[in-house]
Image: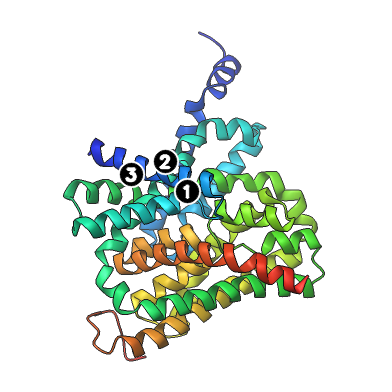
Amino acid sequence: MLFYLTLIFCCQLIGELLIAASGLPVPGPVVGMALLFIGLLARGSIPDDLGAVADTLLTHLSLLFVPAGVGVMLHARLIGSELVPISVSLVASTILTIAVTGISMAWLGRRSVPKQDNNHRGES
Amino acid sequence: MRDLQQVWVYLSASPLLHLTMTLVAYQFSSFVYRRGRLSPLLNPVLLSLVLIVVILSATGTTYDTYFDGAQFVHFLLGPATVALAIPLFRQLDRVRRSAVAVIASIAVGSVAASFSAVAIAWLLDGSRQTLVSLAPKSVTAPVAMGIAEQLGGLPSLTAVLVISTGILGAIAGPYVLNFLGIKDQAARGLAMGTASHGIGTARAMQVSEVAGAFAGLAMGLNALATAVLLPLIWKIFW
C-alpha cells in the first residue's frame, strides 16, 4: 500500500516539476494523473493495491474541498456587494453548462457507440 | 485544573483542533447525506462549509488559523487528482469508443461555461474584475486561479467562485440531467465534471463508477481546453 501511495506522490511531483520547467497552464496533479494513466496503459492492468489506495483517496474526494471552500469567509463582503450578478451568473451558467454538455454527450455518444453495454441507458 | 479559557488558548494554537474540526464536520455531514439517501440537496461539502464557517465566526477564528490545521486535508487534493487515473483506466474501453463525442462535448461545455458566466454577469452590471474572475469558474481551482490572474482577475475570489460552482453543480446537476431525460452515466458524469470540476466528480463518483471516471476525464480536459482557449478568446473580445 505504502509503495503505491509513494508512486502517486512521485507522479504528482514529476508533474509539478514538468509544469515548473515548461510553464504550461495546467496544474501539476493533472499532469501527474496523465503520467500515471500512461504507466497503466504500458502495464495493461491496475495492481490490486494501487486500486485500493486510489479508492480510499477518491471515496472521500468531497472532504478535500472543504478547507478551500471555507475561504468563502475572506470574500463575503466583496461577493455581497455584487451578489446579484455573481449569484445569477453562477446558477444559470452552471445549469446551462451541465445541460449543454449532457445533451451533446448523450446525442453524440449514442451515434458513435451503436452497441451499448450500459444498463443505465434508457430509451430517451 | 486549568480554566476553560486556558484550555481553549492552548487548543486553538495547535493544528490538531482545526484538522479535527474539519474531519468531524465532514463525518457529520456525510452521515446526514447518507441518511438522506444521497439527496443532492444535502451536499456534504456545503453542509461542512456551513458548519465550519458558523463555528469559526462564533469563536472569532481567522481563516489563516483555521487553514494551519486544515491544510493537511487540503494537501491530499493533489494525490487524489493523480488517483483519478485509476477509474479512468478502468473505463478505458468506453472512453476510447466515444472519444470523439467526449472531446466535442467537453469543448462545447467549456465554451458555454465561460461565455454564459461572463455574458450574464455583464448584463447584470458586474464589475470588470468580477467578470474576469467568473470566466474560469468551471475549471479546477489551481488552473482557474492561474487563468484569472493572467487575465487580470482576482485569484482568491476565483477560488471561491470555483468552489461555489462545484457545489451548485453537484446539487443542481442531477435534477437538470433527470429533467432532460439523460440516463447514460457517461453523459451524466461528463456533464458534471465539465461544469463542476472536482466537486461534481466527487458527486458523480458516489453515484456510479462510470459517471465518476467520465467526470474525472472531463475535469482534466476542460482545465486544458479552458487554459488554452479562454485567454485567446478573451483577447479577441476585449
Chain containing mark 1: A
Q: Tag 1 or tag 3, which sits nearer the N-term? A: 3
Location of mark 2 (residue): A13
Chain containing mark 3: A
3 and 2 marks in contact (CB < 8 Å): no
Distance from the alpha carbon under mark 3 to that under mark 1: 12 Å
Going by the numbered disc 1, the residue's amino acid type is Gly
Q: Locate residue A41: give its quadrant.
A: bottom left
2 and 1 marks in contact (CB < 8 Å): yes
Distance from the alpha carbon under mark 3 to that under mark 2: 9 Å
Residue B60 vs B167, above or below: the answer is: above
Element class at badge 1: helix
Q: Residues within 10 Å of mark 2 (few under 14, many from 20)?
A: some
Residue A87 vs B157, above or below: the answer is: below
Q: Residues within 10 Å of mark 1 (few under 14, many from 20)?
A: many
Q: Are marks 3 and 2 on the same chain?
A: yes
Percent x, y of residue B9? 59, 19
Residue A28 circle label: 1
- Asked if residue B37 shows in the view, the reply is no
Percent x, y of residue B225? 53, 67
Pair 3/2: label in front? 2
Location of mark 3 (residue): A8
Going by the numbered disc 2, the residue's amino acid type is Leu
